[in-house]
Image: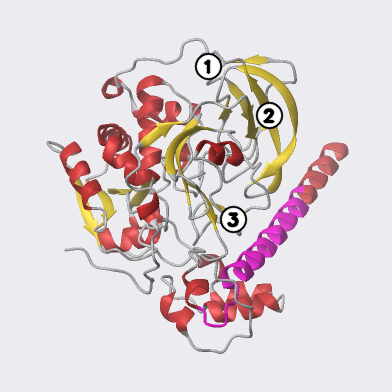
Amino acid sequence: MFGSFLGGIHPKDGKELAKDKPIEDMPVPQELVVPMGQHIGAPCTPTVKVGDEVKRGQLIGTSPAFMHADIHAPVSGKVVKIEPRPHSGMGSCMAVVIQSDGKDEWADGLPLNRNWQSMSSEEILAAIQAAGIVGMGGATFPAHIKLKPAKPVDILILNGAECEPYLTADYRLMLEEGAKIITGTQILQKLLGVKRTVIGIEDNKPEAIKAMQEAAGGTDIEVAALKTKYPQGAEKMLIKVISGREVPMGGLPMDVGAVVQNVGTVAAIADAVEHGLPLTERITTVTGDAIKEPKNLRIRIGTPYQAAIDYCGGFAAQPKKLIAGGPMMGMAQATAEVPVMKGSSGILALTAEKVDHGPEMNCIRCGKCVKACPMGLVPSMLSILSERQAYEACRDEYGLMNCVECGCCTFVCPAKRNIVQYIKNAKGFIRAEQMKAKAAADAKKAQEAAKKEAEK
């Protein structure tokens, strides 16, 4: 029997809107907008120019930076623009705009037919990197970096919890393509050399648990039914519940010998290693009470939200809020012209009836946010200090950078404080200051090197 973790909440999940809708392949729009920033790390630089003809799977963006993931054309066609376009996380980002030629032809040599069992660990990792795969649960950490941990690991955990309300993309993937998930998992077992592998699924998804148990039959892969509690799918929560190990404050999963991957990421890894297919599409849940017909869609990267919404019959009612992702950790959008990206697990449209917009008040020191925080932080103080722009105190005295931004604190706050937004603001300031300090240090180092060179 698996245990639980500190704090957490039980929001109404809203999954009934889409959980019984099989995955549909959405037709490719006439125009796709492919952002050059779809991952944690340095944005890519286009490798194509306006007027170029491209094929699906062709490299169109890369970077010399260590922390990046290559970007590939999601369709065959012509590059018609390279310009800043709306972005669901950055506001605006340089994007390659491709006009489909209607042929949807793969780049030369794709797909491949490889036997992963005969591939070396180095070849497997190279295939994952070449495919531009990132964490598809929303974190968008480049997979090839995460799968080469700097410390020994002995447990691989697959995240099938999908605890975020409304989202059912991973659920449908487990029901419909369990064999591919198992293949991807076995590839990672070989790559990492782990002793134990567990797929964690919340116990409110019995059909998915059964499907994955059947798919894993005859292997050493465990399927664990976990207590339904948000944020069960958070990396550190999964590690705690499944292994009993606790990632230290400021630490990483590899510090306790663990690697965690989303089931969608693992399915993409199977495609990359066996068939050489770059990440050019993903399964996304389009849902909410403002959507006429909620669906789970396999969508090409670069598809505008509005096109996906239109394919679901459009809006059934005027949405009060359009969200990239789910209601807890997603980000509200100002326009439906933002494109689907590698980390786009959901497109959520909610009416005013579903959006609780009470006026924000002063903190009443009730402690509910402290009780709900799965990381053992004091969110009330983080919000108050951030509101006062005391960002260093947030970091140094209250563990700011350990917040996983799950939204539990905001959900339970009776004062309707935007606690997570305050925390994000504080983190943004701290990271900007760190980048300034690094840039200054690099400049100083370059000046000193130039001075020494001149003195020779």
Does label 2 or label 1 sit earlier along the sequence?
Answer: 2
**Front-most of residues 50 and 218:** 50
Q: Is mark 1 on a helix, strand or loop?
A: loop
Q: Earlier in the sequence, mark 3 or mark 1?
A: 1
Q: Is residue 263 above or below residue 424?
A: above
Residue at point 32%, 45% (across, down): 20
Quadrant (top left/top right/bottom left/bottom right) for the C terminus: top right
Say if the magenta span includes residue 414. yes
Mark 3 Cα within 10 Å, few/some/many (few <14, many 20+)?
Answer: some
Q: Provide the residue span drawn in magenta.
A: 413-442
Q: Which of marks 2 and 3 is nearer the N terminus?
A: 2
Residue 162 visible at all = no
Q: Position of residue 315 (x, y in %)?
A: 56, 47
Which residue has dot 1 on it? 104
Residue 99 shows up from this direction: yes
Amino acid, disc 2: Val
Q: Residue 319 carries which label?
A: 3
Disc 2/disc 1 C-alpha distance (Å):
17 Å
Which residue is tagged 2? 96
Q: How far apart are marks 2 and 3 (CA)?
A: 29 Å
Q: Nearer the viewer, mark 3 or mark 1?
A: 3
